[in-house]
Structure formats: C-alpha cells, structure tokens
Amino acid sequence: MFEYDPVLYSRILTGLTLAVHTIFSTLGVGVPLLIALAEWIGIKRNDEHYHLLARRWARGYIITVAVGVVTGTAIALQLSLLWPNFMQVAGQTISFPLFLETFAFFFEAIFLGIYLYTWDRFKNKMYHLLLLIPAALGATASGFFITTVNSFMNAPLGFTYENGVLSNINPIAAMFNPATPTKVSHVLSSAYLTSAFVLAAIAAFAILRGRDHVYHKKALHLSMVVAFVFAVVTALVGDLSGKYLANYQPEKLAAAEWHFETMEEASLILGGILTEDNEVKYALEIPYALSILAHGTPGAEVIGLEEYPKEDWPPLVVHYMFDLMVAIGMGLAFISFIYIVMKKKKSWNPLNKPLLSLIVAGGPLAMLAIEAGWFFTEEGRQPWIIRGVMRTAEGATTSQHVDIMLYLFAALYVILIVSAVTVLIRTFRANPVEKELKKRGIE
C-alpha cells in the first residue's frame, strides 16, 4: 500500500481518469469522420451497405459519447479539487480554451442529436449528411481546444508570474503556444488512426468468424484506407514533434532516448535496460538517428540530461512508453500498407487469415499506443505541472481524503466500462448485420 501522500494520490487519480477518458475521447474525435465517409460513399455510389455502415457505427458511437461525457466531467471536477493551486495560476490563462471546448461539445451534441433523429427523413440524403458535418467538426474542435490546454502546460506563454502574482495575461498567446501545432496535429491524426483501426478490427473479426458478407468487406476496406492515410500523417507529425522537443523540451527528448551526454551524431536507442549507473545495455542503437530526429541532420548536436539538475529530470521510464508508442505506430502503418498492396493486386487475397488476425490485434494495440503516448506526454513533463513555472507538488491539494476519492472513482470507472461494453455487445448481438440487411431488403 502507498503511504498517504495527497500529491501521489492526486496524480494516480488524475492519471486513472485520463487513461479512461482517453479511450472514449479518442473514439469521440475519430469515429464521426468514419461515419461521414461511409454515408458520403453510400450517397455517391447509391450503395445501401455504406448507408447501413454509417447507421450502425453511429449507434455504437453515441454510447461512447455518453460515457465520455461522464469521464470528461470527472476531469473538470478533479482539476479544481485535486489541483487548486494549479488552477489558481493557470485558470485565467486556460479558461478561454476550456470555455471553447465546452461550446464545441454542445455544438457537436446538438447536431449529433438531430442527425440521429432524422434518418430516412430527407428525400435528398445529402441533407442528412450535412447534419453530421457540424457534429464531426465539433468533435475535432473539442479535441483541438482541450489539447491546447495541455500544450500550455508544456510550453507556457501568455502571462507573467512573479511572487505568486499573475499579470500580463494573454489567453490567445497561451492557447497558441509553440507546442500547439505539433501536439494538436498528433492528437487528432492519431485519434483518426486509432478509430479506423478499432472499426477495422471489428470488421476483420467478423470475417474471421466466417461472416463473409460484402458488408463486412466494405467496412474493412474503408477503415483500412483511412488507417493507412492517417498512419502516414501521424508518422510525419511524429517527426515534427521530435524536432519540437529538441528545441523546446530537450530534457524530455533526452529522457525518452536515455541520452545523457550532449553530443553530435547522436544515436537513437530502442529498447534496452538501464543500470543504476545510467548505462544502457541490450539496446538497439541506430547511428545518427537521434540527431536526424532532433534537428534533421546526422551531425547535429543533441542536448543530454547532463545539462540539467537531476531533480529536474523526467522519469526515465518514459523511454519504454516512447518506444511502445513508436513501435505500434510503425506496425499499424505496415499492416495497413500491406492490406492496400494486397487489395490492389488482383491475384492476392487481402482477406487471408494472418493479415486479418494482425488487423484484429491492431485495434487494441492502437488504443495502447494512444495511452502510451499520453503517459509519455504527462510523465515526460515531470517534475513540472506547468513547465518551468510550477512543480507538480506545488499545484496539488493538501486534502486528507484523496485516497477515498481514488477508490470511489475507480469503482465508477469499472461500472462505466463494464456497462458500456455490455450495452455495445447486446445492441449489436440483438440486431446483427445479416438480420438488418434482410429486414431492409439489402442484398
């Protein structure tokens, strides 16, 4: 058992809440794009399979949105309850994007409700699709605004903080800080990639189970094409993110790569074990790769952790989270690329069992990569809650009951996840695709 420490329990509870919310918020941002694409293709090709695909995806999506609302509300409550000093300092600078995120959510919810209510109510089906576009834009905007808050914590701008007094507040500068472009791009592209792979995994699993209806094949194809596009985009943004870290958070990049000494022609470290003397063993080293990642040239100098006091070092365990995120991302790009190539070749079978099994595994792995990425982002900023301004311990509550909150919220999240999974399974088992196709007279 942990010895009671309000800072530690606050971090565990916040981390747990973010881990759970990330699952639903990722799907909340990414799935609307897939629904819109399915309905648009259905209209363009007059294909009822794609119309049904959009309809069924929307049913599952609304359940994840409902749970995401609860976990998102929990985060808002915990910011005030667990991190009062942080909110006192940062609240005036980040209140603007927090307000805009709430507005974007309501914008999404209103149009999503109208969209779900108006199936088959328009002679021109394009009108129905137009109702989804504001909902999809609202979901993306919600992800954008909340990510700018996290960007501010990594690259704080837009205020002066001296002797506990906040002045010269500029919320716009705070929101559009140096971390915003790469962080927002990475969050959005990875959300689209993950959502596509989750939906592809469902279709691939159905085909593996012997349900070889063309509906599942179309669902798989659409999802994998979207996954490939955003796998490439995510990789490109990841490269830019490495260059951002090298310029603005070099200690975070150094911790991720166990790079202790400032040097030119720095190697990239994959895997390995770190000894007590900070020696790296059993790792795969790629010569010059870290210099290329950091500054685009093999001879570039990369700052090492030796330049910083040891108390300011991020936890070195972030190396494994960084490697896990990158490895899964590369794996997803490879799987989707292989599918595209095999689909193009008439004589090859993209529905072979090994590839379908990899696609099924890609769904949960994509979500694991998202979790690893957020763990790297948050732990890599430590020991700061606002980098260079406020340490995590300074921002936390001193309450004596955070441990009780942790147990209660943990129980709540178990109930929410079990309920969501149960409802999703029962919803689709009670109305399988084949039954609905027959009911609608679709061949």
Image: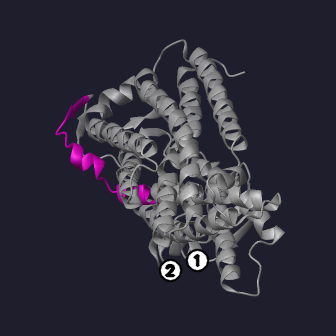
Q: Residue drawn at (40%, 63%), measured in percent from left and top?
A: 247
Q: Which residues are magenta?
A: 165-186
Q: Residues within 10 Å of mark 2 (few under 14, many from 20)?
A: some
In this orientation, which residue lies closer to the viewer: 391 or 217? 217
The quadrant of the rendering that contains the N terminus is top right
> Dot 2 corresponds to which residue?
299
Q: Residue drawn at (38%, 23%), measured in percent from left and top?
A: 84
Residue 268 falls in image quadrant: bottom right
- The answer to if 158 sits in the magenta stretch is no
Q: Position of residue 429 (x, y in %)?
A: 73, 42
- The answer to if 177 sits in the magenta stretch is yes
In this orientation, which residue lies closer to the viewer: 210 or 411? 210
Q: Position of residue 225 (x, y in %)?
A: 58, 71
Q: Choose the circle earlier in sequence order: 2 or 1.
A: 1
Q: Residues within 10 Å of mark 1 (few under 14, many from 20)?
A: some
Q: Vertical placement of 277 versus 98: above or below?
A: below
Q: Residue drawn at (58%, 59%), measured in percent from left and top?
A: 196
In the image, is 408 to the left or to the right of 364?
Answer: left
In the image, is 217 to the left or to the right of 155?
Answer: right
Q: Position of residue 259 (x, y in %)?
A: 59, 61
Q: Secondary structure at mark 1?
A: loop
Marks 2,1: beta carbons within 8 A: yes
Amino acid identity at mark 1: Tyr
> Dot 1 corresponds to which residue?
288
Amino acid identity at mark 2: Gly
The quadrant of the rendering that contains the C terminus is bottom right
Can residue 279 be seen here? Answer: no
Q: Vertical placement of 23 versus 351: above or below?
A: above
Can residue 438 be seen here? Answer: yes
Q: Position of residue 271 (x, y in %)?
A: 72, 61
